[in-house]
Amino acid sequence: MGVILAIGNAIWEHEVGTRFQAYLPWDEAVDSAFFSGFLSFWSYIIILNTVVPISLYVSVEVIRLGHSYFINWDRKMFCARRRTPAEARTTTLNEELGQVEYVFSDKTGTLTQNIMVFSKCSVSGRSYGDVFDVLGHKAELGERPEPVDFSFNPLADKKFVFWDPSLLEAVKMGDPHAHEFFRLLSLCHTVMSEEKNEGELYYKAQSPDEGALVTAARNFGFVFRSRTPKTITVHEMGTAVTYQLLAILDFNNIRKRMSVIVRNPEGRIRLYCKGADTILLDRLHPSPQELLSTTTDHLNEYAGEGLRTLVLAYKDLDEEYYGGWAQRRLQASLAQDSREDRLASVYEEVESDMVLLGATAIEDKLQQGVPETIALLTLANIKIWVLTGDKQETAVNIGYSCKMLTDDMTEVFIVTGHTVLEVREELRKAREKMLDSPHTVGNGFTCPEKRSSAKLPSVLEAVAGEYALVINGHSLAHALEADMELEFLETACACRAVICCRVTPLQKAQVVELVKKHKKAVTLAIGDGANDVSMIKTAHIGVGISGQEGIQAVLASDYSFSQFKFLQRLLLVHGRWSYLRMCKFLCYFFYKNFAFTMVHFWFGFFCGFSAQTVYDQYFITLYNIVYTSLPVLAMGVFDQDVPEQRSMEYPKLYEPGQLNLLFNKREFFICIAQGIYTSVLMFFIPYGVFAEATRDDGTQLADYQSFAVTVATSLVIVVSVQV
C-alpha cells in the first residue's frame, strides 16, 4: 500500500502539484516529484503501521495469561488427596493444546498409580501368590480366605498383604531357595532405612519397585535394618547378620539390572543380581532347562496379568577372582576417557554365568479414569502411543485394561524381530494386511525402500478397520534407523494405538522426534519420572505428572497435574477453548485494523497522496488502546462456543483445531477482505454525504473535521457490533 501511494504522490506532484507551487511550495530539500514520492512512502509506512500495531502482541500475551490462570484455577483438575492443583508453567502453548494429534505416554506412574504391591513370585520353579479352592480352581479376590498372618515377625509391615500361605511355610521350614530369594531382596537395593520409634522401620527408596521388594523381604523374615558405605545389616529370621558390602553395580536404563557383591560372615563372596528378563536370562549359567523353562512360563503368566516382573540370580565368586576383578574395576573408574564404557565392560564380565533363583511380580494398578480418558481422546481423533520400559506381555495387558487395545480391533500387530531384515519384513506384512498392498500406506502414499524425508500426510484415511502395533525395544532400535524410520512411521501412524515396550529414555525421545519431524501434527508427551524428561522436552507440549518418582518430569514440563484423567479436560476443554478464542481474536483484530487503516489508503486518492491522516491524532492513538480493546480482549479471554460439558460429551468438536480450520491462510484473507470492504463503506458513504454538503446555516461547506469524526464514530460502532 505504501508503494502504491508513493507512486501516486509522485505522479500527482508531477502532473498537478507543479501548477500549485505558488500555493503549495515544496520544501527546500525536495527538488523533484520523484523525491517527493520517496518521502511520501516513508510517511505512509508510519501511518499504515496500524495494520499490525504493538497492541497486538500485548493483547495476545494478556489473553494467554488469562487462559493459563483458568487452568491453574480449575477445581476439576485439583487432586484433593495430594492437595495438588493443575499448573500451567507456560503461557505460549495454550492454543496448541487445542490442536494435539499425537499423545505419547509413559505407563508406570502415568497410566498406573505407581503404588507397587508385591503380588506373586517364582522361587526355584514354583509359583507363589495364587490361592486355590478345594477343587483346584484359582480363587477370586472376594473368595479368598484371610491374608497371610505375619505376626511371628515383630518388624513386619502391617500394611503388607499376601494371600498365599505356602510361601511363608516354605520360609519357616527353612527352604534354602526361599531364604536365598528373600536374602537377595534384602541386600540388592539402594534403600535407606529409618527407625523413628523402636520397632517402626521406614524405608526410603529411589523407586517404588525397590521399596515393595524390600518390604516383601521384611515381612517374610529378612528385614533390612541399616547400611553404611561398607556394610549392610539384615535380620534374618530374628538373627542380625552383617554383610560386608564390596561393590554396587548400579542400575541404569541401558543395563536394566542392578547387582551387589557382598561377603557374608563366613567369608564367602557372592554376587546378587536382579533385572529385566530380556537382559538377565541371557547371562545365566546353563541352568537346568526345566527350571529355566518353568520360570519363563511364570514370567509370561505374570506379565499377561499386567504385573511388573524382575528376574533374580546370584553367582559365587572366589577370593582370587574377586581381587583381580576389583582391581580392573578400580582402573576403569579412574580412567580419563570412556570411563562409563570401561565400567560397563567390567560389570558385564562379572555379571555372567549366574544361577537362576526366581522371579518377582509386582502389581501396579491403573489410575482411576484412565480407560474413560483414553476412549474419549480416541474419539477426538487423538492417537495415543504408550512408550514403556515394561516387557511386552505386561504392556499389552495394560493396553487392554485401559481400552487402548480392544477385542473389536481388526488385528494387533506384534513386531519382535531381532534384525533389520526381520523388522522390515514384519512391518511390510502389517502394511499388506492393513491395505492389501505391499507398498501403499495412508492416502495411497507410496513407500519405496528409500525415500526423501518429505513431510507425511497429516491424516491417514485409507486404512479400513482398526489396528494396533506393539513393538519391542530391540526391534524399535532397528526401526528407528535412517533407512527404516519412515516405513515404521507410516505403519505406526496407520494404527489407532501403538505400544513400544522395553524402550530406553533415548528411544522415547527418538520416537517423539520422528513423529514431530515428519508429521504436520502437534505432539504431546506425558510422563512422571526422570526417564520421561527427554521425551517431555522433545514434544511440542510436555505434561508432567506429579507422583511417586520426584518432580523432574514436572520441572521439565509445560503443564503439570497429578492424574492422567485430567488430560482430557486440559485438551478438550481448556485447549479447545484457547485455540477457539485465539483464532477469533486474531481474525477480529486483523479485520478491525484493516478497516481502520484502509480508510487512510482511500483518503490518499483525495488529498494528493500527501500522507494526510483522516482521523484526529488522539483517535489514532486510542483506537486500539481504548475504543476497541475491551470487547476483543473480553472475547479472547472469556468466549465459549459451547459449555464445557458439551466439549466433553462431543469430542468431535476438537477436530477443527487438529485440522487448523479456524485460522489459516484462507481465514486470514477473508478477514482482510472483510476489513477492506468495511473500510470502503466507512469512507465513501460519509465522503459522498459531506463532499458537497453545507453547514446548518447553508453558507459554508461542511468541514473536514466533521467528516473525520463521522468516519471514526461509524467505524467504532461497526467493528464493535462485529464482536
Image: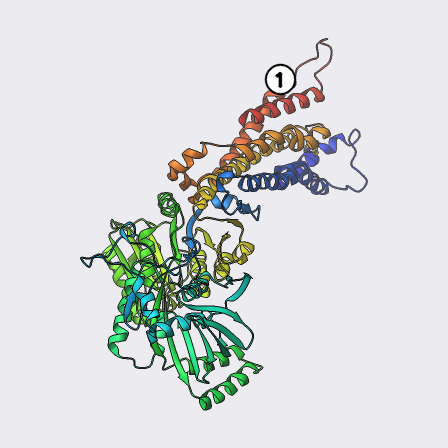
Question: Is 142 situated left or right of 718 in this image?
Answer: left
Residue 690's place in the image compared with 379, above or below, is above
Question: Is 436 situated left or right of 681 in this image?
Answer: left
The quadrant of the picture occupied by the N terminus is: top right
Residue 597's place in the image compared with 188, above or below, is above
Residue at far left of view: 135
Across and down, in percent, residue 214 comes to 44, 66
The quadrant of the picture occupied by the C terminus is: top right
The residue carrying pointer 1 sits among few (fewer than 14), some (14 to 19) or many (20 or more) residues within 10 Å by Cα, namely few
Across and down, in percent, residue 713 comes to 64, 22
Residue under circle 1?
689
SS of the residue under disc 1: helix
Question: Would you say residue 243 is visible in this rendering?
Answer: yes
Q: Quadrant of residue 64?
A: top right
Q: Which of 8 and 44 is in front in this view?
A: 44
The residue located at (55%, 36%) in the rendering is 585
Residue at far right of view: 28
The residue located at (25%, 55%) in the rendering is 139
The residue located at (26%, 79%) in the rendering is 288
Across and down, in percent, residue 25 comes to 79, 33
Question: Is 333 situated left or right of 29 in this image?
Answer: left
How many numbered markers are drawn?
1
